[in-house]
Image (cartoon, rainbow, N blue to C red):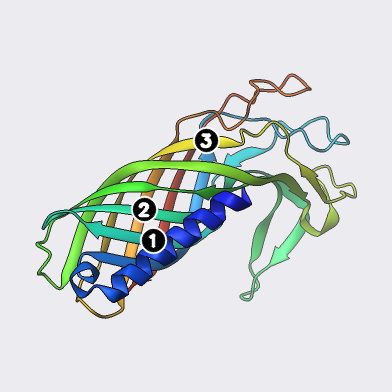
């Protein structure tokens, strides 16, 4: 894993040095960094089972898990409108189950009562290597670029865990709940996702440019290496993710 990361980092750095030394090449290759947020969801219900003290988990409902992404980008212009891109991303994904907690009262700044929830998080962190082909709706000479793209994102799972969090220490039955963080077993170490997205930003050459990126991805392989858990619950699911990010190109 460390050798793969070092290889990609050195590759990005080598291309960047080459671009700086060759002015003609610099016009066709842009490097960047970006960061953003994800909303991810399993395609099928996976029953929360990490807490052995709770046998009735039927009141948990599925919700998107909000998480972060960050990484490096490189775009090479093939034609006036076609670009080949590559990225090295840290991408935290997963899903959240939550249930209403009516034993806790939350009051906002305006004095209004808000619903409290207990949350069960599936947290899976990936290092991804997206390869993208983009079409720019504007010629490369335009100052603004607007492009759509598609591609694949091979990924390596580097961390996986479950987190059960009770609002103010009370579970859904009003008893004392103990927050838990446990390893998540049977996650596929390698996976691959299909990507589509839209990117827009400044295209002025020889300067640092701001861009925005909106992306949808669908995991092609199952999230887990088994179809059922040790307790007999379903683990046969893939993952859908939408993400929004901002970055700079130089």
Question: In the shown orientation, is residue 105 left or right of residue 35?
Answer: right
Q: Mark 3 points at which residue?
A: 191
Badge 3 vs badge 1, beta-carbon distance below 8 Å: no
Q: Disc 1 or 2, which lies upstream in sequence?
A: 1
Q: Where residue 140 appears, x then y in whole percent? A: 12, 64
Question: In the shown orientation, is residue 90 left or right of residue 11?
Answer: right
Q: Give me the C-alpha separation between circle 1 and circle 2.
A: 6 Å
Q: In this view, does 136 lie above or below 18?
A: above
Task: Determine which quarter of the picture holds residue 183.
Answer: top right
Q: Nearer the viewer, residue 22 or 71?
A: 22
Q: Where residue 151 appears, x then y in whole percent? A: 33, 42
Q: Mark 2 points at which residue?
A: 86
Structural crowding at the residue carrying mark 3, measured as other residues with C-alpha within 10 Å and reported as few (<14), some (14–19) or many (≥20): some
Q: Give me the C-alpha separation between circle 3 and circle 2.
A: 17 Å
At mark 3, the secondary structure is: strand
Badge 3 vs badge 2, beta-carbon distance below 8 Å: no
Task: Determine which quarter of the picture holds residue 244.
Answer: bottom left
Q: Which quadrant does the C terminus fall into? A: bottom left
Q: Give me the C-alpha separation between circle 3 and circle 1.
A: 20 Å
Q: Disc 3 or 2, which lies upstream in sequence?
A: 2
Q: Residue 73 carries which label?
A: 1
- At horizontal 72% and vertical 45% (from top left) the residue drawn is 161
Badge 1 vs badge 2, beta-carbon distance below 8 Å: yes
Q: Which of 156 and 95 is in front in this view?
A: 156
Q: Which of 111 and 116 is in front in this view?
A: 116
Q: Which of marks 3 and 2 is in front?
A: 2
Q: Where residue 100 appears, x then y in whole percent? A: 69, 46
- At horizontal 88% and vertical 36% (from top left) the residue drawn is 53
């Amino acid at each position: 894993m460390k050798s793969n990361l070092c290889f990609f980092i050195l590759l990005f750095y080598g291309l960047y040095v080459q671009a700086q030394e060759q002015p003609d090449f610099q016009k066709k290759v842009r490097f960047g960094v970006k960061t953003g947020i994800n909303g991810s969801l399993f395609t099928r219900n996976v029953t929360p089972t990490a807490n052995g003290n709770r046998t009735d988990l039927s009141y948990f409902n599925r919700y998107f898990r909000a998480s972060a992404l960050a990484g490096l980008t490189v775009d090479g212009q093939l034609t006036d409108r076609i670009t080949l891109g590559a990225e090295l991303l840290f991408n935290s994904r997963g899903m959240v189950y939550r249930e209403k907690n009516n034993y806790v009262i939350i009051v906002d700044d305006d004095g209004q009562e808000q619903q409290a929830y207990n949350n069960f998080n599936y947290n899976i962190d990936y290092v991804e290597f997206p390869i993208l082909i983009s079409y720019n709706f504007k010629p490369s000479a335009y100052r603004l670029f607007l492009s759509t793209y598609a591609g694949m994102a091979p990924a390596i799972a580097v961390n996986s865990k479950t987190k059960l969090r009770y609002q103010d220490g009370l579970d859904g039955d009003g008893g004392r709940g103990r927050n838990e963080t446990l390893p998540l077993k049977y996650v596929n170490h390698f996976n691959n996702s299909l990507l589509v997205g839209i990117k827009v930003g400044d295209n002025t050459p020889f300067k640092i440019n701001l861009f925005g990126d909106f992306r949808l991805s669908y995991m092609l392989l199952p999230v887990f290496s088994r179809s059922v858990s040790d307790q007999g619950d379903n683990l046969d699911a893939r993952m859908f993710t939408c993400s929004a990010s901002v970055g700079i190109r130089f």
